[in-house]
Amino acid sequence: MLQYETLPPSLAGMLRSFRSCFTAPSFRTFSALLAGMIAQPGRHTVCGMLTAAGLAGVWHHAKAHWFLSRARWNTDEVGLALFRLVVTHLIPADAPIVIAVDDTLLRRSGRKVALTGWHYDGAAGPRSSRPPRRRPPTALAAAGEPGPSAAARTGTR
């Protein structure tokens, strides 16, 4: 069975950045699923991640499904922790950061999903084939250092 202490030090150090986003049991589940996702080639199914982490037959897959659907953790906090890791480890300290935002709709629906409203997803195809759906709006963001063409346009560097 995968133990947190058996993770490579570099991965364990990275995972510590996410510790404050979870309760103690949820953090153990998150760590195991992330390690399994990294070790699993191909499709990253829950059962595949548990198998890659050495937890198939030790944990029931319902534990992972419970974590993904009902556990108490905030996706915004996890996203900010990931953003801080990217900025501190992959972008030079003095480099400007360019953030691109995509307002693609989250693929969750139902009466109990918070902040939902009727939204039309323009990326889903023509209106006749995809009616508006009751979904929460989301924003996806990507950060990075501007490439050479952006630096030439802005006159930086």
Image (cartoon, helix red, strand yellow):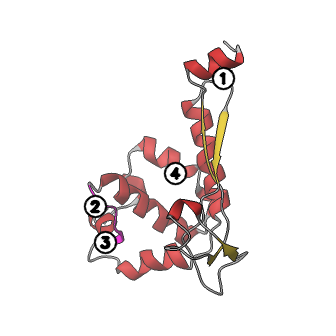
Relative horizontal placement of residue 66, taking residue 151 as reference (left or right): left
- Is 66 situated left or right of 84 in this image? left
- Residue farthest along the bottom direction in this orientation: 111
In percent of the image, x 51 and y 45: which residue is there? 13
Seen at 46% across and 68% down, the residue is 29
Q: Are marks 4 and 2 in contact (CB under 8 Å)?
A: no
Q: Residue 103, position in %: x, y?
A: 64, 56
Tell me which label, 4 or 1, sits earlier in the chain: 4
The boundaries of the magenta stretch are: 42-46
Name the front one of labels 3 and 2: 3
**What residue type is disc 4 on?**
Leu
| For residue 114, above or below residue 45 | below
Name the residue tied to disc 1: 95
**Three-letter amino acid code at disc 2?**
Ala
**What separation in Å lies between label 3 and label 2 (alpha carbons)?**
9 Å
Q: Alpha carbon of mark 4 to alpha carbon of mark 1: how far?
A: 25 Å
Q: Earlier in the sequence, mark 3 or mark 2?
A: 3
Point out the tag, 3 or 4, that comes first from the N-terminus: 4
Mark 3 nearby-residue class (10 Å; few <14, some 14–19, many ≥20): some
Disc marking residue 52: 2
Q: Earlier in the sequence, mark 4 or mark 2?
A: 4
Give the residue type at disc 1.
Ala
Circle 4: element type? helix
Magenta stretch: includes residue 135: no
Residue 147 horizontal/vertical position (percent) = 56, 23
- Please tell me in which quadrant of the rendered image residue 47 appears: bottom left
Which label sits in the foreground, 2 or 1? 1
Q: CA distance from mark 2 to mark 1?
A: 37 Å
